[in-house]
């Protein structure tokens, strides 16, 4: 008999066993034998699951997942699956006979049970293997449906699950008929010698009853008892599943050289605390700090003091067992560096490997990434730092020349490893983090293993949607109690989400008092809202005040609550003062000259704006392409640094993390935390003794019944009345409110009122975790799920050529090329919402040409006459009012 010892290293391997494939030969690549794949996935599990990880029952998690790895593709051993692969002649009698996951699921339960694991651990393995190519289900119902078998029912009356059980039994019989030696060896490995192939086959019907009993209700007839699952069940299933999926997918992607394994492929390069300390030390050496000196020197003193006390308290916090910590510091106190220092210190003391730094918006990720790149002199393509969001190219490659050809690091695996957060520091969004914990898609689950014993920084957690305010603490509890992670929530406006959190800042109020940069003024329209909720400010009056402020030489920011409101304010300012230099127009000219938005120099745009006139205007909203928006924000920084007076009219996108300092800020009425975040853009660098923040209440734009403030913040939970009462409680008798009264006192009162009066957050969301309702969690989203159409705006010849290249690639069926080019165009894309499918906006957007026939993404080319009305260089993408031209396209 032919020996396959050369391929597997096992002399017992028969020719039948050797010809069972997991992945067939394809396009010049050798196929992968099933045994080799099972061994390979098992070995990768050892790189994915830490040796000290434990299940809720205290069992070694690595051993559990290794067991699952040995059996997850066991169902591929049937002749039916080999026929499906095309490596054996014939066809399966029924398509369902080629489904391999159900066989693996029952084998997983048997193997774990044979090894003496807890019943819920066995159940978790059953679900993880059964769904290793799909999404997690309603776990209790899934287990019951797959295992329940009615008595005395004729075959003609069997339901779908009973038919599936019969098919699994026949698949086992097929394996026993053709490859019993392979089956015996797999069961021997999976059970560590505590079970046998014969016992498994003979006891299959009894096994169904045993599995059913773990979730079946008693005394009331057949049904599911959700109370039979512990509160830890969801976390256990999620980790088993995510770990198996990561090991399996990276093995399959490396199938052509599955034996070339490297533990380094899954390892992180850890950013060092020492290097960060050196970086901070250099900053402090260049800045004089004196508690009794000038204002700048006092601020440097408090910044240094905050850094050192946070680091000291973080060490004590870690030594005391960790959990959840908070960092509450005002703008300008270096929260980012303090948070990173605390995270690195905790990681060192807990023996962790990774840090995940999560923020609410993609627009502010780049600032954190840029600073991390400067500190560690690296980029985002190595094992130290990853940036992961929908606009980023996310990959991990070896830094050593010659290593890029390793099987574990070809393009597919490189992307998988990065998107699985294997780097030492991953900077990402709340969406990526929490949606990977709450009913994730199959590919999203691969992040879960990286979260064990990690340190997770939540920057600006108040930005989380209110509906998630009970689910997020539940997920954080899962992270800290089940995955041994540590969570740090840091912001100037703590939303009081975590009851038992430890504050790492000694006496936060002292820092707020020491760093007062602004004072607040309530416009008469806001006073009227507080008193009567009537009498909003007209746009004409708002424009008059803005122009007076601008003409006085102040760099001014007006933050609006909606895109329509920001556009109307911008248009009225331009009409009233046509001599203002339009920075968007200047950028458009520079873009046309350069031909690449990423090559446009913000300093050059700022210089041209200064030369064109004394006063300028800039509009910012999400209707501008992300790539353009970033350059315009950098241009605004240049202009404020040069002391050039200009007016920026923006939506809320500037409120978090945008490092621009204005002399005056005007904020449309909003919740207290949003007002404070907007104020963080005023006198940010302490250019004057006090900046001024005005809170007004703007009227509704034409054809809208509600003011922008009411439309945005009184949906569902009515936030504005709570905010108004809070402002009233701290306003006093003077014209101005002091910063600490608003940024500290009002914030605390506001959140206390929200929790007490509104009971914000949906209890049902948190209950889905306790009941292991992964199906319901999957339906949740941190992003407002409005109707929207994505549109690529082609402003350069290169972008137009990219669209043409996509169309050509589709014609050639080169879909990898299509996907790559579509990814390249993400930063040239805007998402345009519409309110109903039969609205004018929906019809207009639906008439735009798709980039290719299978794409949900449309495109416009403003250089072509038929698309000219869809784009304005100042305000970005526009749904035109006049649709006559479009009717003739």
Image (tube, rainbow, N blue to C red):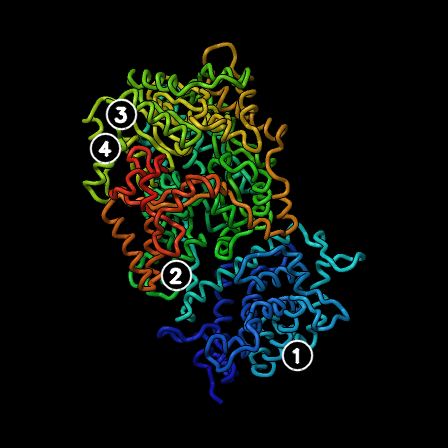
Residue annotated with mark 4:
586
Whether residues under marks 1 and 2 lie with C-beta atoms below 8 angstroms apart, the answer is no
Q: Quadrant of residue 156?
A: bottom right
* Residue ID at (36%, 51%): 850
| Residue 691 visible at all | no
| Between discs 4 and 2, the one toward the N terminus | 2
Residue annotated with mark 1:
198
Instruction: Determine crowd level at label 3: few under 14, some 14-19, many 20+ residues with C-alpha closer than 10 A.
Output: many
| Between discs 3 and 1, the one toward the N terminus | 1
Vertical placement of 185 versus 69: above or below? Answer: below
Q: Who is closer to the viewer here, 720 or 211?
A: 720
Q: CA distance from mark 3 to mark 2?
A: 47 Å
Whether residues under marks 4 and 1 lie with C-beta atoms below 8 angstroms apart, the answer is no
Considering the numbered disc 2 on the image, is that residue within a helix, a strand or a loop?
helix
| Between discs 3 and 2, the one toward the N terminus | 2
Residue 823 x %, y %:
35, 52
Whether residues under marks 4 and 2 lie with C-beta atoms below 8 angstroms apart, the answer is no
Residue annotated with mark 3:
616
Considering the numbered disc 1 on the image, is that residue within a helix, a strand or a loop?
helix
Camera-near label (3 vs 1) is 3
Residue annotated with mark 2:
412
Camera-near label (4 vs 1) is 4
Whether residues under marks 3 and 2 lie with C-beta atoms below 8 angstroms apart, the answer is no
Q: CA distance from mark 4 to mark 1?
A: 78 Å
Q: Quadrant of residue 153?
A: bottom right
Q: CA distance from mark 3 to mark 1?
A: 82 Å
Residue 815 x %, y %:
36, 61
| Between discs 3 and 4, the one toward the N terminus | 4
Q: Who is closer to the viewer here, 639 or 314?
A: 639
Considering the numbered disc 4 on the image, is that residue within a helix, a strand or a loop?
helix
* Residue ID at (29%, 15%): 552
């Amino acid at each position: 008999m032919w020996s396959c010892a050369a391929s597997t290293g096992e002399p017992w391997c028969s020719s039948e066993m050797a010809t069972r494939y997991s992945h067939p030969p394809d396009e010049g690549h050798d196929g992968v034998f099933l045994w080799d794949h099972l061994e390979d996935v098992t070995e990768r599990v050892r790189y994915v699951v830490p040796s000290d990880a434990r299940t809720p029952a205290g069992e070694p998690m690595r051993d559990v997942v290794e067991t699952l790895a040995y059996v997850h593709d066991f169902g591929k051993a049937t002749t039916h699956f080999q026929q499906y692969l095309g490596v054996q002649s014939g066809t399966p009698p029924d398509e369902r006979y080629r489904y391999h996951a159900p066989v693996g699921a029952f084998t997983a339960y048997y193997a774990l049970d044979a090894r003496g694991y807890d019943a819920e651990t066995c159940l978790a393995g059953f679900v993880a293997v059964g769904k290793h190519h799909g999404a997690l289900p309603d776990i209790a119902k899934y287990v019951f449906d797959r295992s329940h078998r009615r008595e005395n029912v004729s075959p003609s009356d069997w339901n779908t699950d009973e038919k599936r059980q019969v098919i699994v039994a026949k698949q086992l019989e097929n394996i026993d008929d053709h490859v019993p030696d392979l089956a015996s060896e797999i069961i021997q490995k999976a059970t560590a010698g505590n079970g046998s192939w014969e016992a498994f086959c003979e006891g299959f019907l009894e096994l169904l009853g045993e599995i059913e009993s773990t979730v079946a209700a008693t005394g009331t007839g057949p049904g599911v008892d959700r109370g039979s699952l512990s509160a830890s069940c969801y976390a256990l299933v999620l980790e088993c599943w995510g770990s198996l999926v990561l090991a399996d997918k990276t093995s399959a992607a490396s199938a052509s050289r599955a034996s070339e394994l490297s533990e380094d492929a899954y390892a992180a390069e850890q950013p060092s605390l020492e290097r960060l300390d050196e970086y901070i030390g250099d900053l402090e050496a260049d800045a004089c700090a004196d508690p009794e000196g000038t204002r700048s020197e006092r601020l440097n003193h408090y910044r240094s003091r905050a850094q050192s006390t946070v680091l000291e308290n973080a060490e004590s916090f870690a030594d005391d067992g960790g959990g959840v910590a908070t960092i509450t510091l005002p703008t300008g106190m270096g929260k980012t560096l303090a948070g990173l220092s605390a995270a690195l210190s905790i990681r060192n003391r807990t023996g962790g490997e990774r840090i995940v730094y999560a923020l609410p918006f993609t627009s502010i990720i780049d600032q954190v990434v840029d600073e991390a790149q400067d500190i560690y002199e690296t980029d985002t393509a190595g094992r130290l730092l990853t940036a992961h969001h929908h606009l980023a190219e996310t990959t991990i490659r070896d830094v050593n020349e010659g290593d890029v050809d390793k099987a574990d690091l070809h393009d597919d695996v490189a992307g998988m490893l990065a998107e699985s957060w294997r780097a030492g520091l991953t900077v990402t969004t709340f969406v990526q983090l929490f949606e990977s914990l709450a009913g994730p898609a199959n590919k999203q689950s691969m992040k879960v293993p990286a979260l064990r014993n990690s340190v997770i920084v939540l920057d600006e957690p108040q930005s989380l949607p209110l509906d998630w305010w009970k689910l997020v603490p539940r997920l954080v509890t899962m992270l800290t109690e089940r995955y041994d992670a540590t969570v740090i929530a840091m912001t100037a406006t703590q939303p009081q989400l975590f009851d038992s959190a430890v504050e790492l800042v000694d006496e936060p109020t002292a820092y707020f008092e020491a760093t007062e940069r602004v004072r607040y003024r309530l416009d008469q329209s806001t006073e009227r809202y507080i008193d009567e909720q009537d009498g909003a400010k007209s746009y004409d009056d708002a424009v008059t005040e803005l122009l007076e402020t601008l003409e006085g030489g102040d760099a001014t920011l007006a933050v609006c609550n909606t895109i329509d409101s920001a556009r109307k304010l911008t248009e009225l300012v331009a009409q009233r003062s046509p001599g203002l230099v339009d920075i968007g127009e200047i950028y458009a000219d520079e873009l046309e000259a350069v031909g690449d938005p990423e090559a446009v120099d913000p300093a050059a745009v700022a210089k041209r704006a200064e030369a064109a006139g004394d006063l300028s205007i800039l509009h910012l909203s999400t209707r501008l392409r992300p790539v353009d928006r970033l350059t315009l924000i950098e241009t605004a920084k240049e202009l404020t640094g040069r002391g050039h007076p200009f007016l920026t009219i923006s939506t809320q996108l500037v409120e978090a993390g945008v490092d621009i300092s204005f002399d005056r800020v005007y904020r449309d009425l909003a919740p207290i935390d949003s007002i404070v975040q907007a104020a963080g853009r005023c006198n940010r660098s302490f250019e004057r003794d006090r900046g001024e923040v005005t809170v007004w209440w703007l009227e509704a734009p034409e054809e809208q019944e509600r003011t922008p403030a009411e439309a945005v913040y009184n949906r569902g939970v009515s936030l504005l009345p709570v905010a108004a009462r809070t402002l009233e409680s701290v306003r006093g008798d003077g014209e101005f409110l002091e910063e600490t009264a608003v940024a500290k006192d009002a914030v605390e009162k506001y959140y206390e009122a929200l929790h007490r009066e509104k009971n914000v957050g949906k209890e049902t969301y948190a209950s889905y975790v306790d009941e292991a309702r992964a199906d319901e969690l999957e339906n949740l989203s941190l992003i407002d799920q409005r109707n929207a159409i994505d549109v690529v705006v082609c402003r350069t010849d290169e972008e137009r050529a990219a669209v043409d290249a996509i169309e050509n690639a589709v014609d050639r069926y080169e879909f990898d090329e299509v996907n790559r080019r579509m990814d390249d165009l993400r930063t040239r894309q805007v998402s345009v919402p519409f309110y109903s499918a039969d609205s004018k906006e929906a019809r207009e957007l639906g008439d735009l040409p798709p980039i290719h026939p299978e794409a949900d993404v449309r495109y416009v080319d403003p250089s072509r006459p038929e698309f000219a009305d869809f784009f304005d260089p100042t305000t970005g993408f526009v749904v035109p009012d006049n649709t006559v031209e479009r009717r003739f396209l």
